[in-house]
Each structure stands twice: as C-alpha cells, then as structure tokens.
Amino acid sequence: MFKAFVAAAAGLLLVTACGRSGPFSDMQQGERGRVVRIIDGDALVLDTGQSVRLVGLEAPAMNWREKDPEPYAEASSRMLDDLVMGRAVRLYYPGMTRDRYDRALAHVETADAKGPHYWLNAEMLRRGGARLRIYPDTDRASEALAAAETEARAQRAGLWKEAAYLPAQARALTPDARGFMLVWAELADEAPLPEDTYGGPPACSRRTEGSALIIDVGHAADAVCDLPPGTRVEVRGWVADGRLELVHPLHVQDISDRN
C-alpha cells in the first residue's frame, strides 16, 4: 500500500518548487511575507501578523503556556528557525485555508535569494524535525511529504532517534495514553462505532489483537475496513480514551512482512 508510491513520490522532492511548476502547481497561491517568529517546528508568524501552520506535519510542541516542551521540541524549533527566520516566503494552499485559530494552513517555500531554496514542509520532514500528519482537506502533495519522512526514518534523523516518537506496540499502551502516536497493531474484528463523534461516525471501527485499542477508521481511509483480521499495520493518529483516529490512507502501512 505504502511502498508503491514511495519511489515515485521521492522524485517530486527533486523538482524545484519555484513558481507554479512544482508540487504547488494545483494549489491556490497565497500571500507573501517575511518570517519574524517561530512558534514551534510546524508554525511560524509573518511580518503581516499572519500565523501559519505548515500542513502535513506534526512537530513536537513547545507548550509555551501549559507545561514543559515535548521531547525534541526545542531542537525542532531551532531547525525551522535556522531554515527560515528573517527570510521571505510564499504560501500555497492545498485546500482549506484557515483553521479555527485563524492560522493559514499552507505549504511554505522560501522566496528570496538569502539562502538555499526550501519547501519547508518537506524539508522539516526530511531532516526529522517533525512527523507526517495529514488531513484529507489539505492533503495535496502528501505523497512527497511521506517520502521525505521515509528518508528521515531510514537515517534516524532528528526526532527519529528519540524513543518517544518510535512506534508503540498497541498491547503496551496504557488506558491513559493520549496524543498523536504511531502504533504497531494486529487488526482483529470490527468493533462497535463510537457513540459520540465529532464530524460524524467513522467508516468502521477495528479491534486490535491482544490490546484494548480500537481504531476508528475515517472514510478517507476506508480500505482498512476490508483488511482481513491478522493484518499487521503501522497506524498513526490521535489516541484518547483507548481509541485511535485514523483519518488518511497515508497514515497506515501494512507491515505484515516485517519481523
């Protein structure tokens, strides 16, 4: 499922993103500005005052107001700072343009001659500054982002050296596990759908063998509903109350051939 597109998608990373001929060719061109603040490894602020959330990735949170930074958060923030602080950038919108916090949901490329050209979303993944996290309403160019993360994981770059971000075994998750996680699990039979769901019920829910974890499969990833029990998968999504939300097909890999 996953391996089929990696080689082709990796080629996209070699295509310059200048102008509209690269991975942004089918996206809405957004505003331009200069980066004046880094919030964490997946969010920044322009001199226009606009906050920007880099789509397709999940960086460790700095948790400025709440608690201590997550593991590798400071390194991830420094990584983005080194790449782009003070530089002019251009935004490209792959779908929905704003979130509920009025942040721009965008792919970001450098737009000056002050340093190397970067597609920041892909570069942060390639360097291991963040993990892949895709939503169906902003998922254009996601195959190239997935290929960038694959490269980082193979090299154990950045956060992939941190135990906190390696895939967890489903059977090892505690009932209070919470957060965006990568999990290795063996699919079992279907489970009852959750009673209360934001945005409507999932396409199906799957139990996991030897574990209390239930995977709620979104409609974009509904092929998982047809996988036979016993299929070993790596899934990623938000975990809370013993359930994992699987929202995108690139958030699941068949790992049945791994030892």
Image (cartoon, rainbow, N blue to C red):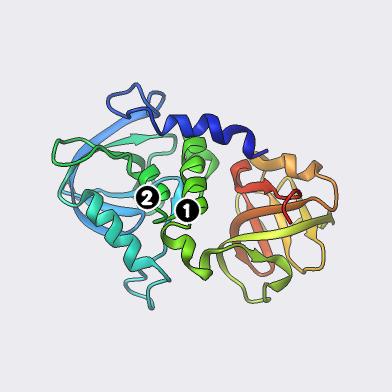
Residue 132 can be seen, yes or no: no
Figure disc tally: 2
Q: CA distance from mark 1 to mark 2?
A: 14 Å
Question: Badges 1 and 2: C-beta atoms under 8 Å apart?
Answer: no
Residue with the mark numbered 1: 155
In which quadrant of the rendered view does residue 12 lie? top left
Classify 12 as above or below 58.
above
Q: Nearer the viewer, residue 32 or 141?
A: 141
Quarter location, residue 186: bottom right
The amino acid marked with disc number 1 is Gln
Which residue position is annotated with label 2? 124
Residue at x 63%, y 76% (from the top left corner)? 176
Residue 150: give x, y in percent of width and height: 52, 46
Measuring 49% from the left and 38% from the top, which residue is drawn there? 142
Left or right: where does residue 105 sit relative to residue 256?
Answer: left
Quadrant (top left, top right, bottom left, bottom right) of the C terminus: bottom right
How far from the left and from the top, in percent, is residue 219?
67, 41
- Name above or below for residue 118 compared with residue 168: above
Please, is residue 246 above or below residue 71 in the view? Answer: above
Q: Is residue 120 left or right of residue 147?
A: left
Crowd tier of the residue under label 1, counting other residues whose Cα lies within 10 Å: few below 14, some 14–19, many 20 or above: some
The mark that comes first in sequence, 1 or 2, is 2
